[in-house]
Image: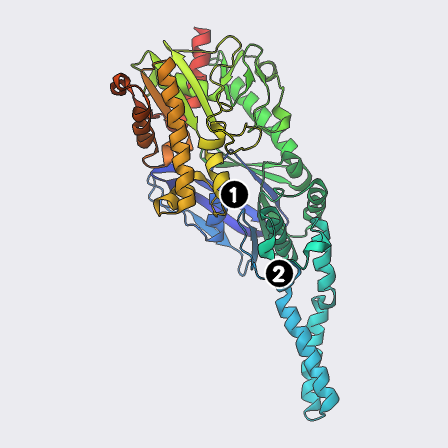
Amino acid sequence: MALLQVNDLYMGFSGETLFKNISFSVDEKDKIGIIGINGAGKSTLIKILLGLEYDEVDPATNQRGTIAKKGGLKIGYLSQNPNLNKENTVFEELMTVFDNLRQDYHRIQELNIILAENLDDFDKTMEELGKITARYEQNEGYAVEYKVKQILNGLSLAESLWNNKVGDLSGGQMSRVALGKILLEEPELLILDEPTNHLDLNAIEWLEKMLKDYKKAVMVISHDVYFLDNVVNRIFEMEGKTLKTYNGNYTDYTIQKEAYITGAVKAFDKDITGIGMSCPGPLDLINGKVLTPPNLNGKWHNLEISKALSEKTGKPVYLDNDANLAGLAEAVVGEGKDCKIVQYFTVSTGLGAGLVMDKKIYLGAHGFANEVANSIMMQDGPQIGNILPGGIEAISSGTAITERAKRAGLVVNHAGEVNDLAMKGNKEASEIMKDAKNYLANFIALIYGYADPDIVILGGSVALKIEGFVEEVENLVKEKVYGVMKPYVKVRKSTLNEDSGLIGAGYLAFSKEK
């Protein structure tokens, strides 16, 4: 039986389509993993299902999608920013799940006292006591403290923390408490957004087992492929502004995806002579090998992707950095099509760069030209992942903006929300956005100092979706270069939007095969 049925859901953002034609159902015992790149709309989709955000009318059809839920459907949702009573102790906060049972317990005690002290209305009192006791026992009221302790131990929350106030916990510990509450509630549909964040290995293994044994439906957003492999039986992939469904776990999904790609290539055998592939760096472009991109999991590291994909498709495969290819697209058909030297930056999850001269990507001596993420711009500056402290990616990328805001205590999910807070006058958010723009402008000013490009083009979600970002960066760059250079400073927004990397990959293959 379907708990949830979604048909033709549409969502836009700042005039751009986020996703469309989203249709799926969730059955009673489904274990669904939701995957997709950052910005694909995974969390937005969940918020729409929960009624926390509302879908829009599709401008192409003038229709709004539909969401049908089973009557009285109980949904438990773990967000990345849980709402907890910070004055409660950890144990008290989890016990709030059983407030009704605790009220029953206290009423049982009261009725027993009444019976011991006063025999008036004996039959009526006994009748009430019998009903409440039966309900209490049916709902395993005597086991609630045991259940709470089981959850706390499973999530590796040390007993020494149980009497601490929730407000005194770290962000990771709060997330564990929130997860524990939801698991204790046992909703018909459990929705988890990146639940393995902040969990150690033992806690992850415990959660995997618990979810596998969970008798009701689960939907989980996760980048942890090992976790998905061990828990889910269906995969929802958000890709190309829509949603595709696959049966099985993550490994099953990769096999089906590979077969689909291979079949698609063979279906168009007469037209396809080569394949261009876009991938975040660092890459070994000489040997067509993925090295250690921080935004790809370990299964992708040190992978000879060009060789592997060529063997599957029977076609030559040409690999290049995603920022290089976006820059190539802009130089050929985009904002830089009339320019000799085009410098491109993608300001998104990470921060990448590509330099294109005379419609050709400049790779450098070893293929690492424009691997700029670790370029130190701020002494003892912030750090994210394996990026060096003060590296430009640790200051100006979307991830950096979001993480710095969270560390400052702000409740945000992406850089756009940080900017919204900054526009409303929030001091911490304003400082973070100021740093992101100012240090990026410093870096671009350096580029103008040694490369003298015709144009600098900014793409990626931060540059494209935050109003005024590109214009402000351009003005800052003009303040930082020699006066004679100011008339030649030209910082523009990508006109190819998020398709630039795809277009560049296609052009790369085409140019190689000419």
Q: Nearer the viewer, residue 72 or 494?
A: 494
Q: Which residue is mark 2?
A: 93
The colour mode here is rainbow
Q: Residue at x 47, y 47 (%)?
A: 410
Looking at the rendered image, the quarter that the C terminus falls into is top left
Q: On the picture, is 395 further left or further right than 59?
A: right
Q: Residue at x 68, y 91 (%)?
A: 121
Q: Which element is circle 2 on?
A: helix
Q: At which x and y percent is residue 110?
A: 68, 81
Can residue 358 be seen here?
A: yes
Q: Name the side, left or right, on which 298 lies relative to 457.
A: right
Name the mark nearer the viewer: 1 or 2.
1
Q: What amino acid does circle 1 point to?
A: Arg
- 133 lies above or below 256: below
Judged from the image, the secondary structure of the residue bearing numbered disc 1 is helix
Which residue, as the protein is rendered here, is positioned at the far bottom?
A: 120
- Residue lying furthest front in this view? 379
Q: Considering only vertical position in the picture, is 359 above or below 480?
A: above
Quick one: label 1, few (<14), some, or many (20+) residues within 10 Å?
few
Which of the numbered marks, if any, corresponds to residue 366?
Answer: none
Tell me which label, 1 or 2, sits earlier in the chain: 2
The picture places residue 424, in percent across and down from the top left corner, at 35, 48
Q: Nearer the viewer, residue 96 or 370?
A: 370
Q: Could you say which is closer to the camera, residue 403 or residue 58? A: 403
Which image quarter: residue 299? Answer: top right
Q: Position of residue 240 (x, y in %)?
A: 46, 31
Is any part of residue 416 visible from this angle?
no
What type is the residue that disc 2 sits on?
A: Glu
Give the numbered dot on residue 407: 1
Crowd tier of the residue under label 2, counting other residues whose Cα lies within 10 Å: few below 14, some 14–19, many 20 or above:
many
Residue depicted at x 54% and y 28%: 387
* Rendering coords of residue 407 (x, y %): 52, 43
